[in-house]
């Protein structure tokens, strides 16, 4: 593992995206987002995505400028036609609009279609919580999971995230794939020549496997069995059917299809946290809830009860001080791209 300073890594990734034709502003948005994922320990959605993002830009399957049209707007909602722009800048605009509408009307609902991979949903919901809002975010994804009882890919990993502001306590930020694991974690394991745990996926012949390649050719299992399937279905409806984006096997594959646009959808539901009671009262009650949860009697061998997002926050604090750990394979990928575009390579990366 190499540990690279947060600001160094952010600048490095930003330069990569500006070198391929992304504006400075949007390149910084993308870099900040990817580095934040690595800061939180979500490496499947971190700077390891730089390679596939730049490849799709090179192949002109994703447009380099941020272009979108606001459709079907009401005081509390708007549909964004993303016009095949990059997902992270698009979704960033989406959550900003949802917060604006929530501040004005109490609720802000934003749907996005004709979008692309938008990274880690926690980045968007936590941003809303920082603005004193409660937020829910979902996005569709290319097929990776079968409907419960099936053996053919149909649904994506279909993540969802929520965040809630608090008073003196940490904001609550929850983010999960509705599959047992995000597909990106299996892809990362393949890139790093690592096995995956049993229980993550089945091979195409229906057998449990620890081989990431077999898992990618097969199906990823839903989190919680039929319950995970039910949540996956809702995410598909909100992200795809409700917004007019593609769904299921109609979504373009991020990694394997360089002819077809992804056309994924994103959905944001944001509420002002003072909608039903005064903000200071709500936040005080949130702090009380958290305090009582922390003091619940623990099971045997459990040292601490964590809150949603607390482990990721602690990782982020540690990496702020000691740098972000990246595997040799991820660093080598960034170096390769940098050499291609004649970008200076930070000395930290070659230690």
Image (tube, helix red, strand yellow):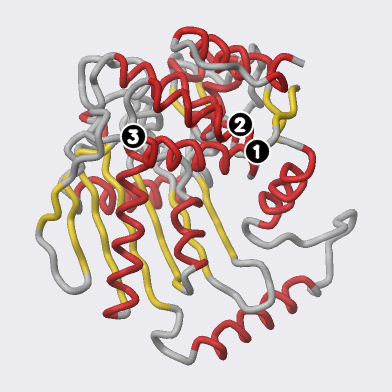
Give left or right: position of 11 versus 153.
right
Disc 1 crowd, CA 10 A, few/some/many (<14, 14-19, 20+) = many
Residue 9 point in image, percent of width and height: 61, 31
In the rendered image, residue 194, in percent from the top left (x then y), is placed at 66, 16
Residue designated by label 2: 9
198 vs 121, left or right, is right
Residue 86 point in image, percent of width and height: 31, 35
> Distance from label 3 to label 1 (Cα)?
21 Å
> Residue 5, relative to residue 331: is it above or below?
below
Q: Dot 3: what SS?
A: loop
Q: Which residue is mark 3?
A: 23
Say left or right for 66 vs 310: left
Judge the density around disc 3: few (<14), some (14-19), many (≥20) Cα neighbours within 10 Å. some
Can residue 51 be seen from the camera position used here?
Answer: yes
Location of mark 1 (residue):
6
**Which residue is more in the foreground, 185 or 283?**
283
From the top left corner, tell me how far across and down residue 1 is, in percent. Answer: 75, 22
Proximity of marks 1 and 2: CB atoms separated by less than 8 Å: yes
291 w.r.t. 10: above or below: below
Q: Is label 1 in a helix, a strand or a loop?
A: helix
Q: Earlier in the sequence, mark 3 or mark 1?
A: 1
* Residue 210 visible in this rendered orientation of the protein: no
- Residue 69 tag number: none
Q: CA distance from mark 1 to mark 2?
A: 5 Å
Real-space Cα separation, disc 2 to disc 3, in angstroms: 18 Å
The vertical placement of 171 against 337, above or below, is below
The residue drawn where x is 20% and y is 37% is: 246
């Amino acid at each position: 593992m190499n540990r690279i300073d947060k600001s160094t890594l952010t600048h490095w990734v930003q330069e990569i995206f500006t070198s391929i034709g992304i504006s400075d502003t949007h390149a910084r948005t993308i870099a900040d987002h990817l580095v934040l994922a690595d800061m939180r320990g979500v490496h499947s959605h971190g700077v390891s995505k730089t390679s596939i993002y730049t490849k799709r830009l090179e192949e002109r399957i994703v447009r380099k400028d941020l272009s979108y049209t606001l459709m079907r707007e009401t005081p509390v909602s708007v549909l964004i036609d993303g016009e095949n722009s990059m997902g992270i800048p698009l979704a960033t605009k989406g959550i900003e609009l949802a917060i604006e509408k929530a501040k004005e009307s109490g609720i802000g609902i934003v749907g996005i279609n004709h979008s692309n991979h938008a990274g880690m949903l926690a980045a968007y919901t936590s941003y809303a919580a920082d603005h004193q809002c409660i937020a829910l975010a979902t996005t569709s994804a290319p097929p990776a999971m079968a409907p419960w009882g099936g053996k053919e890919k149909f649904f994506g990993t279909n993540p969802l995230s929520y965040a809630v502001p608090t008073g003196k306590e940490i904001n609550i930020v929850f983010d999960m794939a509705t599959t047992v694991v995000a597909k990106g974690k299996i892809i990362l394991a393949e890139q790093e020549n690592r096995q995956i745990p049993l229980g993550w996926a089945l091979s195409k012949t229906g057998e449990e496997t620890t081989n990431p390649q077999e898992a990618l050719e097969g199906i990823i299992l839903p989190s919680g069995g039929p319950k995970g399937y039910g949540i996956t279905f809702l995410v598909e409806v909100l992200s795809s059917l409700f917004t007019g984006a593609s769904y299921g096997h109609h979504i373009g594959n991020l990694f394997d299809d360089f002819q077809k646009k992804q056309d994924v959808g994103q959905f944001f539901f944001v509420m002002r946290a003072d909608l039903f009671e005064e903000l200071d009262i709500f936040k005080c009650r949130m702090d009380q809830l958290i305090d009582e949860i922390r003091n619940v009697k623990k099971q045997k061998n459990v040292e601490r009860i964590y809150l949603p997002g607390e482990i990721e926050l602690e990782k982020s604090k540690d990496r702020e001080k000691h740098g972000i750990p990246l595997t040799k394979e991820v660093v080598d990928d960034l170096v390769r791209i940098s050499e291609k575009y004649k970008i200076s390579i930070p000395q930290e990366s070659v230690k």
